[in-house]
Image (cartoon, rainbow, N blue to C red):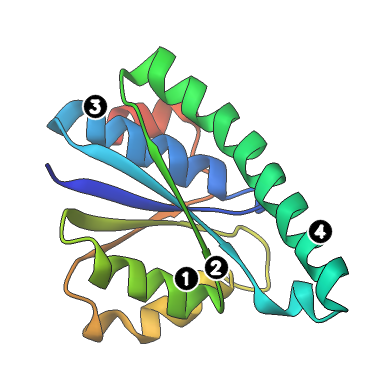
Amino acid sequence: MRKFLVVLDDSRECLNAMRFAAMRAAHTGGGVEVLAVIPPEEFNHWIGVGDIMREEARESIHAHFEVFAKWMRDKQGVDPELVIREGVPVTEIMAQVQDDPEIGVLVLGAGTDKKGPGPLVTQLSKNSGSLEIPITIVPGDLSKERLEAIT
């Protein structure tokens, strides 16, 4: 089964990327894989404190994921899977694409402020030639209705 890989983070544009991935998966018979990356700089403390912070980050990711997963299951009939990796986000996204041959499309949400589309879109666009799959960039300010029409 072809899967849409979407990155879970705290950005506003993440919502539209999640919606797009779920809607496309529902319309094409695909799946959704949600990737959350815990950056390494969050744990540069004493070992015990770092372990506690890592566990808290994982709990937060699971709670955030469940909100999206419930919507995907209830509204789109798609049961997403969660993958959590630790490291540099772009490196871990590229590694996940390499590690899972069922991933067919990387879906990213583009920011809407004047600073640009966001660090993931900027960095992954530079690396897109080395990816073996296409990247779909979803504008962060698309309405739900427009997303439905597009998918």
Question: Total label count?
Answer: 4
Q: Quick one: label 2, few (<14), some, or many (20+) residues within 10 Å?
A: some
Q: Position of residue 49 (x, y in %)?
A: 87, 67
Q: Which residue is mark 2?
A: 117
Q: Amino acid at mark 4?
A: Ile
Q: Quadrant of residue 80?
A: top left
Label 3 neighbour load within 10 Å: few <14, some 14-19, many 20+: many
CB of mark 1 within 8 Å of CB of mark 2? yes
Label 4 vs label 1: CA separation? 30 Å
> For numbered disc 1, what is the local secondary structure?
helix
Q: Quadrant of the C terminus?
A: top left
Tag in front: 1 or 2: 1
Q: CA distance from mark 1 to mark 2?
A: 6 Å
Give residue 26's mark: 3
Report if residue 151 is visible in the image.
no
User: Which sits in the foreground, 129 or 91?
Assistant: 91
Residue picked out by circle 4: 52
Please name the residue shown 55% across and 68% down the image. 117
Identity of the amino acid at label 2?
Answer: Pro
Q: Which residue is mark 1?
A: 121
Q: Give yes or no for contact between labels 4 and 1 (Cβ–Cβ under 8 Å).
A: no
